[in-house]
Amino acid sequence: MVQDRSLWTQIDLQQIKDRTTDRLVANLAHKFRSFLCNLNLRDCVRVTSSSLRYIGECRNLQELSLSGIKQINADVVNDIGLGCKNLLYLNIAKCNFDDGVLRVLARHYVNIQYLSLAGCTGFSTAGVYYFMVGQGLHKLSHLDISGCSQITHEGMRYIARGCPLLHSLALNKLARMKDESLYFFTKYCPNLKALHLRHASSLTDTAFMYIAENLPRLKTLCVEGNHNITGASIKMVGRGCPDLVHLFIIDCIQMCDTGLKGFSGTRGLRVVNLGDCIRISDHGVRNIVDGPSGPQIRELNLTNCLRVGDTTLFRIAQRCQSLAYVSFCYSEFVTDAGLSCSVTCRLLDLSTFQVVLWVMPG
């Protein structure tokens, strides 16, 4: 059975990353080149450019992860791009490469749809210019440039203009990114459905007004660790993005009940995480629970929402028939009476209560 080459369409060497060598990669790539569709070399730090070039022989390769491999260079990426014309997914996060790699990507990777450059700091704004002027990368639907803090305001414009078909964008850990940089993506990428802004802490209400005005198809919004934004802009996001399904507003200390009013008419919310938004109270949460999304919500996280109490639990018990997970960690105003109404939830996280610790029966 092991000799049956048709079984080797997917090879995951991450589980043996410490034992994965150039010889092993070269042998596998050569032997199963006609069948291999998915190759994962994530964190295989012993692998070098001498064996990576053999990947170009895998003509049917569609997904490739080289995340964490340090010896990625333009020659390697060029050989892979010339040989693997069907490649749709490329993860080169946490790799140390220069602008030459981006030039090759923009030249040969015309069909790629998923690209992760997260944590790569070796390239410059001159490199991302190729996003806009190259022949490739224009079909990207998912892009992750989290942690690429060297990209300038102008560089963000190059990327946005070169990737008009983006559906998912990750801009996490970009503490210096300004509102105007985000504006480029809302202007040139109108089909965005998922936007991740964790620890993009310099963004203000202006950035979220851009989201509300220009991204009506947005389904997932993740914001964490932003102490600038207020309920006023989040309220507008709720009204401007009626198709939201996943909402994560975490550790945003200026977020208040006003912001949740914008979601009182949202119909499709399934997952809501408001953890560490300490100004939110029962009144704000009721805008979601009592709205059209109430009966459809599957997960609700109110961890460290100190002002939330029994009133919210009562309404959840009455309205949220689909709820599978709810968290009220560190909620000082939740009592036994409120908890008794929550037995319908299949998973209830009530850890670290200061008033009462209740465990749902069997």
Image (tube, grey):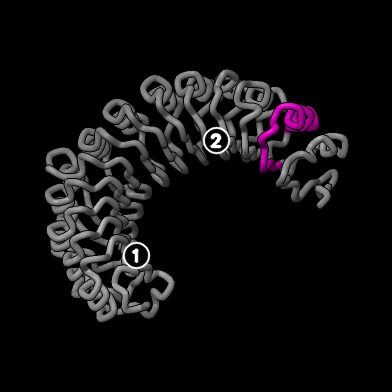
Name the disc covering residue 249, or none: 2
The residue at the point 66 percent across, 24 percent down is 284
Mark 1 = which residue?
A: 10
Q: Is residue 276 visible?
A: no
Label whose residue precedes the other's in the sequence (1 or 2): 1
The x and y percentages for residue 122 are 25, 56
Name above or below for residue 148 compared with residue 316: below
Tell me which amino acid carries mark 2.
Ile
Q: Is residue 286 visible?
A: yes
Q: Secondary structure at mark 1?
A: strand
Q: Secondary structure at mark 2?
A: strand
Q: Quadrant of the N terminus?
A: bottom left
The residue at the point 52 percent across, 35 percent down is 246
Magenta stretch, residue numbers: 307-327
Name above or below for residue 5 compared with residue 305: below
The residue at the point 28 percent across, 79 percent down is 24
